[in-house]
Amino acid sequence: MLNSILTKEQLMPDDLLYLLKLTNEADLEKLFAASYAVKEQHVGTKAYFRGLIELSNICVKDCYYCGIRKGNKQVPRFETSVTEALELAQWAYDNEYGSVVLQSGERQDSAFVQTISHLISGIKEIGASPGLGITLCLGEQTPETYREWFKLGAHRYLLRIETSNKKLYKQLHPNDGTHSFEQRVDCLTELSKIGYQVGTGVMIGLPGQTEEDLVNDILFYEKMDIAMVGMGPYVVHKDTPMGGDVIQNGLDTEEERAKRLTTSLKMIAATRLYLKDINIAATTALQALHPLGREMGLKAGANILMPIITLPAYRSQYQLYDNKPCIDDTAEKCKECLTGRVLSTGDSIGFGEWGDSVHFNSQSRH
Ligand code: 5AD
């Protein structure tokens, strides 16, 4: 059964379900070998670096799972200045990272929107054309804001749907009028219309999430014609309502964490086999659950890495989940460490290249 699925030209939803339910080590190895081969054939084995700048942990949202939710009073709030952020972007350019990702807690006020606009314009002036690629990961905004940032030179936008199961989405977020599944989908549609390369993703191993939900997540990526995917395991943060419950219910054991990691790797593999030419990130959360988590992600079919270049002083305050790796490191250390990790998998690194989504580029030609 497994062999016949892995040699199919196009998988069906039932095949995805079968793959997500695999548990046997030898079967998993076969799965990852097959998804790595599809990555090799469709996007190549170069991993592209996107230097991740975590700009601020000030957030208007109150997601039950997230360590920087508005309601978490334990965490001191910080903001990176435009000058500091431009220095980090310059560092990324000097170190031949093709792109930067600007990520932040969510805010829609005009001071925030303008600061980001200045920052995008400033980054576009760094280096010789085409300079740095810019991915934004700044949550839900108005169409006008999305358009302004695109006009200024940002060209990719990552906005996770978190889960494509509406009922589960409701359980993950407060019912306070600011956390709507439909609104999130509308944002993704708007971003595509404007011309961004759009990425989305989910958390994997959420309480109450089934393998069927995960299959539907992959079908959601397909339906939305997504160019890139950034998804990773759910990782407990103890000072959140959901993290507290999971700990209390005895569901944060070593065994449960290992299961979430394996399911995440199976999701990367199944998504690669199904959608073939999109960009898929090996996210930092994988490494929160296993020291070699990100390498495992590359082996399962991911081709994008986001080395953290956030100022060291702010790193410990940007913990969306517990055990976040690299919080005591510098950008230099993260470069050295991740470079070694990539080369150890047999992949190479696309230094100085944007590494845009092959899927997006082939779409725009038609
Ligand atoms: N575990 C894993 N991922 C998380 N995120 C937020 N909190 C957690 C957590 N506890 C992810 C969300 C969000 C992204 C920026 O971080 O998916 O979209």
Image (cartoon, rainbow, N blue to C red):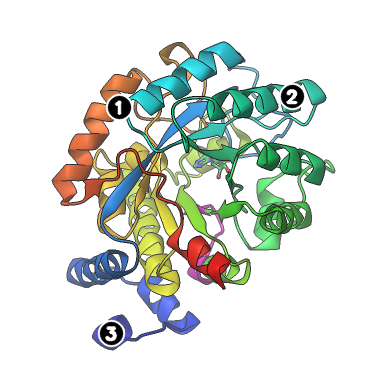
- Where residue 269 sits in the image (x, y, percent)? 35, 65
Mark 1, Cα crowd under 10 Å, few <14 / some 14-19 / many 20+, is: some
Please tell me which residue is depicted at 49% across the width and 80% down the height of the picture: 13
How many angstroms separate mark 1 from mark 2 (CA)? 30 Å
Ligand 1 has an atom within 8 Å of the beta carbon of the residue at disc 1:
no
Residue hosting label 2: 114
Contact check, label 1 and label 2, Cβ < 8 Å: no
**Front position in the image: 232 or 89:** 89
Q: Which residues are magenta?
A: 203-215
Nearer-N-terminus badge (1/3)? 3
- Where residue 275 sits in the image (x, y, percent)? 45, 70
Give me the disc on residue 7.
3
Q: Image height check: is 55 above or below 338?
A: above
Amino acid of disc 1? Cys
Residue hosting label 1: 334
- Where residue 201 sits in the image (x, y, percent)? 54, 54
Q: Quadrant of residue 289?
A: top left
Please tell me which residue is depicted at 41% across the width and 14% down the height of the picture: 312
Mark 2, Cα crowd under 10 Å, few <14 / some 14-19 / many 20+, is: some
**Front position in the image: 251 or 7:** 7
Magenta segment includes 208 = yes
Q: Helix, strand, or loop for circle 1?
A: helix
Please tell me which residue is depicted at 51% across the width and 71% down the height of the picture: 215
- Where residue 316 sits in the image (x, y, percent)? 46, 18
**Front position in the image: 193 or 61:** 193
Amino acid of disc 3? Thr
